[in-house]
């Protein structure tokens, strides 16, 4: 469930200020604009006037602000505006920022009351609005209580309590948010700054066993809402980012480049060491001694100009001079070699037309020293699409400054990743020692993020020292053309049928996985990932990546990895539920662990995908894209077209299905109450129908379920009252003329009163027309209304979640709802008869004994 107010963004949890433990600062001038003799009607005008920026510089906020709330910080960002101006954007009536945010969130019926004085001296107001409907929750009324308990020259504190009683279990909890706006130091350009920190927590009004589910839903909702909040706020207040420690805080757009060091400064910094000075002094003393000494007659072993030491002191002094000179000679040799390699690939211009990548290596910080000494001679190597670019060597430093630009030759397709590794230079024939490495994934970072960023290095010592690089990466398409429409037009003239994805569906796909605009959807399949239980969702394929998304019972699962990360793909020959097993290269896929089945003996992460409507087509398409990932975009599309053309079960009407609807997994079903009736059983007896055993098998046989297989119930982690299992069976020809296979995920939840069971089901129909377009969701509420005589009420709700649109949508939905209503009634009647027969047999056995 959402649980968020109209405010929101995902923020960093790092760099939080040190707050004191006090809830607020009791200061007589917290609201200096509000005089004691003002009426309540004047409070709004006075409070609003304080939000107006008077142009004065504020003192930096001291550490007397409250700590973040318990559930964590969702926004922690500095802005290039005054604290008063930012508070006006958030708190002032009629703020244009709030109006645009409401539009983006599709919030309606927004109403805010004037600020009023409270008994505790704070000012308060009430805000109400209608939250937009989501895929699983209808539009609901929300009300917020705003309390401004600090409003002075050093900062603002705004507390928000949000109540949404109409959402499921909404009467049991309340969302609380805390907005802290702290005044910051002025920039060197006299520009004012402030810091906004938003934290949240859940306040439970009543005890409930659904606490874990409520917290997960609220956390996901607030995170999504605050991502949009930060995006909209950045249009009204300029974000400011912190540079390396010890440097001033400056806007990213105004960071100035430092002047590169001259050759003389390089020589001075490199050779300005004590041992170099000692070697020079020693050599000078030797040469002076030779110049002033008189020639000596040859004696002992002096022959051919070889003068050996005549005493132990001469021997020791000679050894010291030789060692010092040797060390200086090595330094000179290394310096000359590094200067010979100084240019590296800096300034080499890219060639060709297509996707051109430019990398600016600005500087490094806290690089790890080598084992032999307390410094290193670092240089960086960039590898992308099989091409390498090497920087110059920076001598004897752990904080190098390069300011070099590298261009990669244009490629037909955009790159997926770029590897960055920093080495220590120790000569052209020595093995380079790695100081750290990193990978830049162009599918996970937006062009705005890549325009100026610090990337942390991984490695044996890099993480310990906090090593990182400052980079600017720009990826541009010099052709300025889209290959997809051109290809579709060409191949359709040749008679090859390719399904064109709509712009809306491609846009939804890109937004779902936060992908750049050049990444588009090739194909998608309804399937499930196999962990302890099946998680039903949808698999998406694009030229550079594979992604999975699911929203099962309000719990979202989303992960992705690129084709280059896959080491092997295997299809398991299981008759009932064939699986596609993907093995990732060792060390890859760690950020997709929420979908990982485990790790094999070779250290490779493995992923199980099953319950495909058309497993053969899915396997062939996936393997074709993976094996041919280095082909051009047109060749990849042609492979997929050939696979679909050979699939004779896919009709033209299915190929041309309108895919304007977004694909959001479990979120789209509109649950309808299809039937309600009473049964002469208690809740526990009725739920025995869904326990693995003889009774379940008998009912399944009488219902016409063939090859019925069910797994044991498993409790969800952290939710003792929630259990899940998997069920699969085939429908006989009397029920479905296609003899369809059904794979099902069941989840049962017992509420606090121990009298109500909720049984949720997600059913996927295989081998039926349009089977990959939808899933069926069923919910049964079974509640005991009487114990003597035993009686329970059953309410059944059915919904159909659509992944793709079709002209038969209404007809299929009506057919499914009618069939499921009839099947639920029949199943309950059969279970009642079987339970009574079982009880009768047990009684007869007891009487006979």
Image: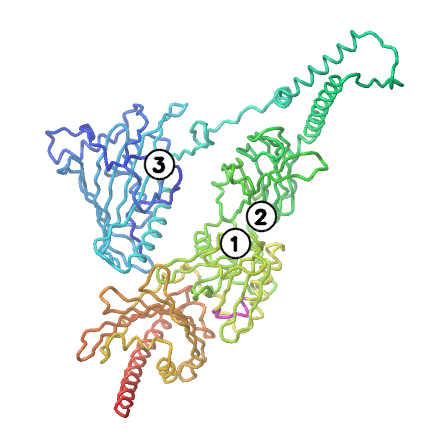
Residue 236 — which label?
3
Q: Is residue 176 left or right of residue 235?
A: left
Q: Quadrant of residue 423?
A: top right
Magenta range? 611-618
The 10 Å Cα crowd at callout 1, few under 14, some 14 to 19, many 20 or more, is many
Vertical placement of residue 453 versus 482, above or below: above
Separation of marks 3 and 1 at Cα, in angstroms: 38 Å
Q: Is residue 43 left or right of residue 86?
A: left
Separation of marks 2 and 1 at Cα, in angstroms: 18 Å
Looking at the rendered structure, the secondary structure element under dot 2 is: loop
Separation of marks 2 and 3 at Cα, in angstroms: 34 Å
Q: Which x, y percent locates residue 359? A: 57, 38
Q: Which x, y percent locates residue 772? A: 45, 68
Which is nearer the N-term, disc 2 or disc 3? 3
Which is nearer the N-term, disc 2 or disc 1? 2
Q: Which x, y percent locates residue 251? A: 43, 31
Instruction: Give the number of the mark in front: 2 or 1.
Output: 1
Q: Tell which of 191 and 200 is nearer to you.
A: 200
Residue 770 — which label?
none
Q: Which residue is under mark 1? A: 589
Residue 415 — which label?
2
């Amino acid at each position: 469930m959402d649980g968020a107010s109209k405010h929101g963004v995902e923020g960093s949890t790092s760099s939080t200020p040190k707050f004191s433990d006090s809830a607020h600062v009791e200061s007589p001038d917290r609201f200096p604009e509000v005089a004691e003799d003002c009426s309540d009607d004047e409070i709004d005008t006075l409070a609003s006037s304080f939000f107006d920026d008077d142009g004065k510089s504020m003192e930096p906020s001291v550490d007397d602000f409250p700590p973040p709330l318990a559930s964590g910080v969702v926004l922690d960002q500095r802005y290039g505006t005054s604290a008063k101006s930012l508070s006006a954007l958030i708190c002032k009536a009629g703020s244009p920022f709030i109006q645009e945010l409401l539009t983006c969130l599709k919030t309606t019926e927004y109403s805010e009351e004037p600020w009023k004085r409270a008994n505790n001296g704070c000012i308060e107001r009430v805000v109400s609005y209608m939250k937009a409907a989501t895929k699983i929750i209808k539009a609901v009324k929300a009300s917020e209580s705003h309390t401004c308990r600090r409003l002075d020259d050093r900062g603002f504190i705004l507390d928000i309590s949000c109540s949404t009683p109409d959402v499921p279990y909404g009467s049991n909890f309340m969302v609380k948010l805390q907005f802290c706006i702290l005044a910051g130091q002025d920039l060197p350009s006299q520009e004012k700054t402030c810091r906004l920190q938003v934290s949240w927590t859940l306040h439970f009004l009543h005890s409930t066993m659904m606490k874990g589910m409520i917290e997960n839903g609220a956390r996901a909702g607030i995170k999504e809402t605050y991502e949009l909040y930060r995006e909209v706020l950045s249009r009204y207040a300029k974000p400011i980012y912190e540079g390396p420690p010890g440097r001033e805080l400056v806007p990213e757009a105004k960071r100035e480049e430092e002047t590169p060091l001259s050759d003389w400064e390089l020589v001075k910094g490199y050779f300005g060491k004590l041992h170099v000075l000692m070697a020079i002094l020693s050599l000078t003393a030797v040469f002076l001694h030779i110049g002033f000494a008189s020639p000596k007659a040859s004696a002992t072993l002096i022959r051919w100009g070889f003068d050996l030491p005549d005493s132990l002191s001469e021997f020791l002094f000679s050894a010291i001079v030789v060692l010092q000179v040797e060390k200086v000679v090595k330094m000179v040799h290394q310096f000359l070699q590094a200067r010979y390699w100084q240019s590296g690939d800096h300034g080499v211009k890219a060639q060709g037309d297509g996707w051109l990548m430019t990398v600016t290596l600005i500087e490094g910080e806290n690089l790890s020293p080598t084992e032999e000494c307390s410094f290193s001679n670092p240089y960086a190597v960039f590898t992308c699409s099989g091409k390498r670019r090497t920087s110059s060597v920076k001598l004897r430093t752990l904080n190098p400054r390069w300011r070099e630009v590298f261009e990669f030759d244009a490629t037909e397709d955009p790159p997926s990743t770029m590897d960055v590794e920093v080495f220590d230079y120790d000569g052209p024939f020595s093995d380079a020692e790695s100081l750290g490495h990193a990978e830049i994934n162009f599918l996970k970072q937006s062009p705005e993020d890549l325009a100026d960023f610090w990337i942390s290095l991984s490695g044996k010592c890099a993480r310990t020292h906090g090593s990182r690089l400052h980079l600017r990466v720009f990826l541009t398409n010099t052709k300025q053309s889209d290959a997809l429409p051109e290809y579709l037009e060409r191949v359709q003239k040749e008679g090859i049928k390719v399904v064109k994805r709509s712009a809306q569906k491609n846009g939804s796909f890109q937004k779902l996985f936060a992908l750049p605009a050049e990444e588009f959807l090739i194909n998608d399949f309804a399937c499930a990932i196999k962990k302890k239980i099946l998680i039903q969702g949808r698999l998406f394929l694009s030229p550079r990546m594979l992604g999975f998304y699911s929203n099962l019972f309000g719990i979202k699962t989303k992960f992705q990895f690129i084709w280059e990360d896959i080491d092997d793909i295997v299809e398991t020959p299981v008759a009932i539920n064939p699986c596609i097993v993907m093995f990732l290269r060792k060390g890859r896929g760690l950020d997709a662990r929420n979908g990982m089945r485990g790790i094999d003996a070779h250290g490779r992460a493995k992923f199980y995908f099953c319950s495909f409507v058309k497993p053969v087509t899915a396997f062939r398409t996936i393997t074709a894209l993976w094996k041919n990932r280095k082909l051009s975009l047109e060749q990849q599309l042609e492979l997929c077209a050939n696979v679909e053309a050979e699939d004779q079960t896919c009709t033209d009407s299915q190929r041309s299905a309108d895919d304007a609807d977004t694909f959001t997994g479990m979120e789209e079903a509109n649950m309808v109450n299809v039937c309600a009736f009473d049964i002469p059983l208690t809740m526990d007896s009725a739920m025995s129908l869904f326990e693995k055993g003889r009774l379940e098998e008998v009912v399944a046989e009488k219902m016409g379920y063939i090859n019925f297989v069910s797994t044991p119930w498993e409790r969800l982690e952290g939710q003792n009252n929630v259990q899940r299992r998997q069920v699969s069976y085939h429908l006989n020809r009397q029920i479905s003329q296609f003899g369809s296979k059904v794979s099902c995920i069941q989840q049962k939840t017992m509420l606090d009163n121990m009298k109500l069971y909720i049984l949720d089901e997600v059913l996927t129909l295989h081998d039926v027309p349009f089977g990959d377009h939808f899933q069926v969701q069923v919910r049964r509420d079974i509640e005991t209304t009487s114990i003597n005589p035993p009686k329970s009420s059953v309410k059944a709700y059915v919904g159909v979640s659509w992944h793709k649109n079709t002209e038969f949508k209404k007809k299929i939905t009506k057919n499914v709802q009618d069939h499921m209503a009839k099947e639920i009634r029949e199943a309950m009647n059969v279970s009642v008869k079987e339970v009574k027969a079982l009880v009768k047999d047990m009684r007869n056995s007891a009487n006979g004994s």
